[in-house]
């Protein structure tokens, strides 16, 4: 459903953020995007819902080039949650913030309320629906922005650094939301939180200085210890432990599989 064909992107100030990127993501895939700061993760995600259009190459959503399409129509297919919630939030109540997207998509009154309620309940903020978004903390504002996208019921959900700044409870909420997304929804997440990626994604794309350097199953990507090290990245803790213990596989991803494999 999302195809990048030799995509490059240069910001108007002259910074080239992506160089010749190519991949294809099918409906229902769960893809993690990793790479150091400035490697191009956010830029790539913004190209997926038309907030940015490629300088070279083509981005296709459901087979259609994004160039002639409006952000509004692409956002109804691909929901993007900003890294910083304060770049996204503009309404004066939490309810209105979450209702904005579905209202624009033409949801009728009853359907609108139930989708907003459902989404706010998932992030534990339905009781705060009448509050101003700035009356709750930064972490909760991040959850509001996730709820806003869930409420639109888009085919693809893209989260930019969703666990950054979250406490363990917030992380659990985000993990649970991702795991409960319906199977046909495409999910893409950029994160430095390797454990989160390992727990929620089947496939990982690695960016380095605007180039795609690895695109493989989560298991295979995290087994490439020395390449990741060269890129300034590291596998999840449990994988690293296994890679150092003689006799254990170098691609374990969960404590459960290690314990059952011994
Ligand atoms: N609005 C912008 N204007 C100019 N350069 C930008 C802008 N946003 C990002 N960049 C640059 O593009 C490159 C990729 O950034 P970004 O996509 O934000 O990477 P990441 O999300 O992996 O940290 C970096 O060199 C960054 O400085
Ligand atoms: Mg970023």
Image: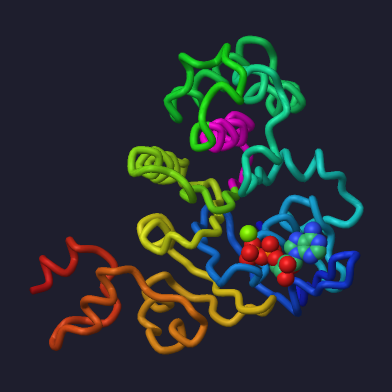
Q: Residue at the location (61% across, 78% down)?
A: 208
Between 221 and 164, the one lying in front of the other is 164
Q: Residue at x 28, y 77 (%)?
A: 240
Q: Quadrant of residue 62?
A: bottom right
Looking at the figure, which quarter contains the N terminus?
bottom right
> For this view, does 159 lie left or right of residue 122?
right
Above or below, comparing residue 219 to residue 191 in the picture: below
Q: Main secondary structure of the magenta part?
A: helix
Q: Residue at x 62, y 25 (%)?
A: 98
- Work out which residue is located at the far left of the displayed protein and give it: 262
Which residue is located at x 85 percent, y 66 percent? 11
Residue 154 visible in the shown view: yes
Magenta residue span: 141-157
Total marks placed:
0
Quick check: is 64 in the magenta stretch? no
Depicted 85 relative to depicted 123: above or below: below
**Quarter holding the C terminus?**
bottom left
Question: In which of the image's four quarters is ligand 2 placed?
Answer: bottom right
The image quarter containing residue 247 is bottom left
Residue 66's quadrant in the figure?
bottom right
Q: Is residue 4 visible?
A: no
Q: Position of residue 24 (x, y in %)?
A: 64, 68
Residue 114: x %, y % from top left? 55, 16
The correct choice, above or below, for 137 with respect to 16 in the image is: above
Q: Nearer the viewer, residue 48 or 19?
A: 19
Q: Position of residue 216 (x, y in %)?
A: 48, 75
Of residues 6 and 92, which is closer to you in this image?
A: 92
Query: Colour scheme used in the picture?
Result: rainbow
Image location (x, y in percent) of residue 201: 44, 59
């Amino acid at each position: 459903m999302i195809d990048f064909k030799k995509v490059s992107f240069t910001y108007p100030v002259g910074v080239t953020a992506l160089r010749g990127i190519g991949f294809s993501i099918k409906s229902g895939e769960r893809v993690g995007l990793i790479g150091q700061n400035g490697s191009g993760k956010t830029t790539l995600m913004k190209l997926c819902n038309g907030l940015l259009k490629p300088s070279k190459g083509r981005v296709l959503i459901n087979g259609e080039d994004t160039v002639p399409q409006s952000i509004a129509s692409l956002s109804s297919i691909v929901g993007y949650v900003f890294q910083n919630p304060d770049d996204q939030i503009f309404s004066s109540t939490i309810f209105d913030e979450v209702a904005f997207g579905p209202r624009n998509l033409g949801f009728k009154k009853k359907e609108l309320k139930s989708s907003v309620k459902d989404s706010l309940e998932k992030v534990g903020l339905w009781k705060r629906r009448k509050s101003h978004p700035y009356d709750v903390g930064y972490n909760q504002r991040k959850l509001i922005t996730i709820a806003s996208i869930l409420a639109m019921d888009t085919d693809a959900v893209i989260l930019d650094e969703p666990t950054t700044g979250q406490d363990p409870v917030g992380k659990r909420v985000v993990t649970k939301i991702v795991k409960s997304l319906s199977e046909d929804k495409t999910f893409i997440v950029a994160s430095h939180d390797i454990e989160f990626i390992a727990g929620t994604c089947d496939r990982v794309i690695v960016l380095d200085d605007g180039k795609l350097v690895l695109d493989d199953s989560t298991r295979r990507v995290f087994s490439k210890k020395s390449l990741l090290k060269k890129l300034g990245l590291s596998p999840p803790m449990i994988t690293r432990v296994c890679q150092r213990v003689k006799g254990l596989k170098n691609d374990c991803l969960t404590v459960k599989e290690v314990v059952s494999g011994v």
